[in-house]
Amino acid sequence: MPWLYATGTTKIRQGTLAVWLVVLFWGFHYVVLYQPLRLINPERYLLVRFGWASGVVFLMCLFFPFWRGISRMDWGGLLLLSFVEIVGYNWTFLLAASILDPVPLVLILSLRPITVALYSHLKGHESFSLFQWGAMGLVCIGIFLVVDGGIPHTMVHLATQKRSTGLFLAFLSLILLTISTVLSRFLLTRVSTVQVTFLPILLGGIILLCLHPGWIVLPTADRTPIIIFSLLYSVFLALFLAYFLWNFAISSIGPTRASLWTSGQPLVTAAGAFLFLGHFLSWVQVTGGLLTLAGFWIFFGKEVLLRK
């Protein structure tokens, strides 16, 4: 595939196109997960998803030995990435998705551009103006409005407590997602995009299956069309294809700019939730979503325009 070897402006454009496709696949993924995670145990869904995925990757390795030529140090990095991204992030994400509605969850995770930017600033990789830091505050206000405006304050304590657990898991998955983004960037300077995409899935699937090997088989009662469709979408589109495009985008335009474009996921998720789940947004959530997206564009817009 010659487009993988493009350089300069062409590679930037291709990286941007790749992350746009990621936004589409991941944004709709929240909608695809909503109903199945209320029909099946989230941990079981996680093990079935990565059990199937690791099996497919293992078969791929038999015909395309892309695992060769990796140093012991890089194997350690790939193993660490599998713990952080495949086991840690996906576990907390699915638990949060089983509790929260799709739109608040995706908006919390859309804080990743800010967390990646903070890391880059602290490490001295990038610096930002006071105007951009003010925009970060606008993003935080928007996220608060979206999350806080999604449930009446008259809800019973049990529902509020369950929702608090979901929010905690969502922010924990945000931290793990940020760490995995930074770690992926480091590994992409040492090994190929294909290796960073598929080998952590293989390693993470093996780790998860060791915890409960019998769960790789989906029970007969759970073999409903909606769950099967969700698993196939989750493995082949949201995992294999989207992770490959995501890693390509990171290597092409960097983690900060790639993360910026993922702020478009709430739009895809909101549209999907409205069309397929019948979910409506309150005016408070709509306002918060607009403030969030405006804050992202103010924060990063200048740099994006300069790169065009």
Image (cartoon, helix red, strand yellow):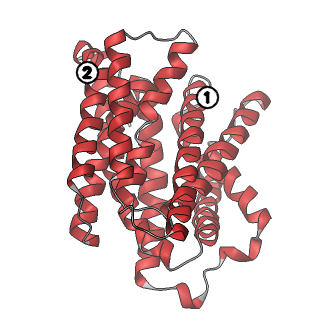
Taking the spot 60% from the left edge, 34% from the top edge, the residue there is: 179
Along the viewing direction, whichever of 271 and 136 lies nearer the viewer: 136
Three-letter amino acid code at the position of disc 2: Gly
* Residue most extreme to the bottom: 221
Taking the spot 33% from the left edge, 45% from the top edge, the residue there is: 145
User: In screen coordinates, is 230 left or right of 28?
Assistant: right
User: In screen coordinates, is 274 left or right of 244?
Assistant: left
- Mark 1 surroundings within 10 Å by alpha-carbon count, few (fewer than 14), some (14 through 19), many (20 or more): many
- Mark 2 surroundings within 10 Å by alpha-carbon count, few (fewer than 14), some (14 through 19), many (20 or more): some
x, y percentage for residue 118? 50, 21
Secondary structure under the numbered disc 2 in the rendered image: helix
State which quarter of the image contains the N terminus: top left
x, y percentage for residue 273? 28, 64
Along the viewing direction, whichever of 236 and 146 lies nearer the viewer: 146
Q: Quadrant of residue 101?
A: bottom left
Reading the image, the residue beneath label 1 is 187
Taking the spot 24% from the left edge, 59% from the top edge, the residue there is: 281
Three-letter amino acid code at the position of disc 1: Leu
